[in-house]
Image (cartoon, rainbow, N blue to C red):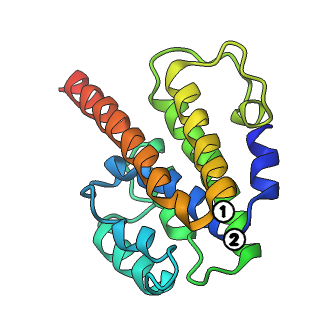
Amino acid sequence: MSLVELIAQADERGLAASGLACLDRCVPLLGGDDEVLRPVWASLTDGGGDWGECLEKARAALDSADPDEPGEDEAALLARRMLGAAPAVRDAAEIRVWADACSVASLQIHRLLDPAEDGAGSVDQRREGRTEGMSPLVAAELRRQVTVLELLAEHGAGGLRRALEVSVEGRRVLRAVVSRRARGRA
């Protein structure tokens, strides 16, 4: 099943976890620490806290720069926009739009940061299942997005811990890419 189909079939919790996982993997671009989104993840559990309140605290911790600040690269701008667009209320319709946008943005971020050339004209082709000639970083991000949605579809709230683990793995990979890129510029 393609990523687009998985998003279309996901419930509100799966969509929220999907969007949050995409954002979480991009935290290295925002200068945040690894724990900054942990309370937002916890809010997805039954009785785990208020999504909006946890999200606002994370925004305050990560929102050190203006999203349109000159000098910030495109990948960081996309990550800031993901954070800024997160709905304050976990309304299914709003979360669906946000999760879909996060999926596109995260794949685009990985495409921008991957030194290997991605053969697709757009990330939409990847989301629809056309994976021929995909660059390694984009391929790994696509797999992570699919895995998160499948885990939540199969296990509901019980899949959150594993979804977070998938996200943490992706964050470590992106942190290494960002670090390598910074060393290359120095």
Q: Is residue 48 left or right of residue 177?
A: right
What crowding class fits label 1: few (fewer than 14 Cα within 10 Å), some (14-19), or many (20 or more)?
many
What crowding class fits label 2: few (fewer than 14 Cα within 10 Å), some (14-19), or many (20 or more)?
some
Frontmost residue, 109 versus 10: 10
Q: Is residue 90 left or right of residue 28?
A: right
- The percent position of residue 31, horizontal first and vertical second, equals 27, 54
- The percent position of residue 26, horizontal first and vertical second, equals 42, 48
Residue at disc 2, secondary structure: helix
Q: Is residue 135 left or right of residue 60?
A: right
Q: Is residue 125 above or below residue 160?
A: above
Does residue 108 appear in the picture of this structure?
A: no
| Residue, disc 1 | 15
**Point 35% across, 66% down: residue:** 38
The three-letter amino acid code for the residue at tag 2 is Glu
Q: Is residue 35 left or right of residue 156?
A: left
Residue at disc 1, secondary structure: helix
Image quarter where the C terminus lies is: top left
The three-letter amino acid code for the residue at tag 1 is Leu
**Point 51% across, 39% down: residue:** 109
Frontmost residue, 46 versus 35: 46
Quadrant of residue 161 within the rendered picture: bottom left
Q: Is residue 62 above or below residue 100?
A: below
Disc 1 + disc 2, Cβ < 8 Å = yes
**Point 68% across, 16% down: residue:** 119
Image disc number at residue 135: none
Image disc number at residue 12: 2
